[in-house]
């Protein structure tokens, strides 16, 4: 996943998620983190499942309000006892 947006937008960012090639159970917890590129995730945002994708609102007034820069996109799925976190792509904000 690679996405380019501007700081003037407020929109949903969709993160495709598969586990062993299948769409995860929508009853599982899902979170998204967007740290600066090259940094590990520290702050997780509660996501919502939407057709097999994790969804978060990005922009001023949203779940994550980025400044100009490059952000790694991480997704974390809670399926007790597992807590799976994976790098899912890049978000470029201009």
Image (cartoon, helix red, strand yellow):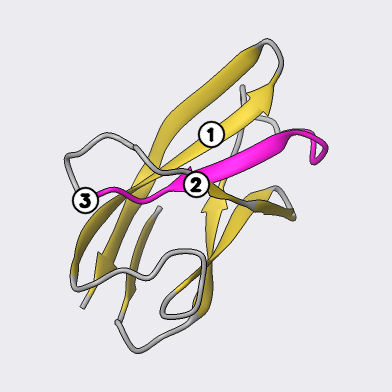
Query: Which of the two discs, 1 and 2, labels the residue nearer the N terminus?
Result: 2
- Whether residue 34 sits left or right of residue 28 in the image: it is left
Q: Are marks 1 and 2 in contact (CB under 8 Å)?
A: yes
Mark 2 residue crowding within 10 angstroms, few (<14) / some (14–19) / many (20+)? many
> Residue drawn 42% across and 80% down?
60
- The CA distance from mark 3 to mark 1 is 17 Å
Magenta region: 25-35
- Whether residue 54 sits left or right of residue 52 in the image: it is left
From the image, tell me which residue sits under label 3: 36
Residue 76 is at least partly visible in this image: yes
Query: Which of the two discs, 3 and 1, labels the residue nearer the N terminus?
Result: 3
**What percent of the width, then of the height, locates residue 82?**
62, 14
**What percent of the width, then of the height, locates residue 5?**
33, 77
**What percent of the width, then of the height, locates residue 16?**
56, 48
> Residue drawn 53% across and 34% down?
76
Residue 23 is at least partly visible in this image: no
From the image, tell me which residue sits under label 2: 32
The dot on residue 76 is 1
Q: How many marks?
A: 3
Q: Quadrant of residue 91?
A: bottom left
Q: Is residue 12 magenta?
A: no
SS label for mark 2: strand
Mark 1 residue crowding within 10 angstroms, few (<14) / some (14–19) / many (20+)? many
> Residue drawn 40% across and 52% down?
1
- The CA distance from mark 3 to mark 2 is 13 Å
**In the rendered image of this protein, does residue 57 appear above or below residue 28?**
below
**What percent of the width, then of the height, locates residue 45?**
52, 50
**Seen from this angle, which residue lies furthest top?**
81
């Amino acid at each position: 996943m690679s996405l380019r947006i501007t700081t003037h937008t407020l929109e949903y960012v969709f993160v495709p998620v598969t586990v062993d090639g299948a769409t995860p159970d929508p009853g599982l917890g899902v979170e998204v983190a967007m740290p600066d590129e090259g940094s590990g995730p520290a702050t997780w945002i509660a996501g919502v499942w939407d057709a097999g994708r994790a969804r978060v609102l990005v922009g001023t007034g949203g779940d994550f309000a980025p400044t100009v820069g490059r952000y790694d996109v991480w997704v974390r799925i809670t399926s007790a006892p597992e807590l799976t976190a994976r790098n899912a792509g890049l978000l470029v904000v201009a």
